[in-house]
Amino acid sequence: MPNEHYKKYGREYYQKNKARRIEANRINQERYKQEWHDYKAALACAHCGASHPAIFDFHHVNPDDPDKKHVNRLIKDRCYAQAYKEIEEKCIVLCANCHRIHHYNEHHEQKNPPAAVPAEGAWEEANLLHGE
């Protein structure tokens, strides 16, 4: 089977060049980490404008998207290109505080929907009806 030939060749090549491949992989991972850090350093919170790279959360605009991928998981799994795409297409950048506040407000709006605001003059009309 031709596929087995390539697998065997790949294993042999790796064994012969193991130290070189490990070093090349280490260098690539350092480069990707630096690129990720530089990318985050160029971002700013969409709400307050804070711009420190350590504070960012990537909020998915559509939380019910079945194709939603967690950016932190993609970065952990070294899928940097996929993480950049996910951020650009499906997320807004928020600092940790604004992200927490956003979800807090979202949660409380679901529990306590805002009361309908009466039209202008409705309070006066209601008071007249009640004899006040």
Image: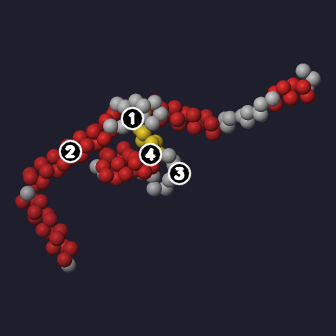
Residue shown at 20% from the left, 44% from the top: 31
Q: Is residue 77 visible?
A: no
What amino acid is labelled 2 in the image? Arg
Q: Are marks 4 and 1 in contact (CB under 8 Å)?
A: no
Instruction: Say which residue label 4 marks.
Output: 91
76 or 117, which is in the foreground?
Answer: 117
Q: Mark on residue 64?
A: 3
Element type at mark 4: strand
Q: Nearer the viewer, mark 3 or mark 4?
A: 4
Residue at which label 1 appears:
44
Badge 3 amino acid? Asp
Query: Where's residue 21, x and y in %?
Result: 12, 54
Q: Give the total number of marks visible in the rendering.
A: 4
Residue at left 16%, top 46%?
27
Location of residue 115 in the rendering, given as x and y in whole percent from the top left corner = 72, 34
Of tags 4 and 1, the one toward the viewer is 1
Cβ atoms at labels 1 and 2 below 8 Å apart:
no
User: Circle 3 sits in a helix, a strand or a loop, which is it?
Assistant: loop
Q: Which amino acid type is shown beneath numbered disc 4?
A: Cys
Instruction: Name the element at disc 1.
Output: loop
Residue 3 visible? The answer is yes
Q: Earlier in the sequence, mark 1 or mark 2?
A: 2
Mark 2 or mark 3: which comes first in sequence?
2
- Tell me the quarter of the picture where residue 120 sits: top right
Q: Which residue is mark 2?
A: 31
- Residue placed furthest toward the top: 132
Q: How far is the residue under mark 2 from the one under mark 3?
A: 34 Å
The CA span between labels 4 and 1 is 13 Å
Q: Residues within 10 Å of mark 3 (few under 14, many from 20)?
A: few
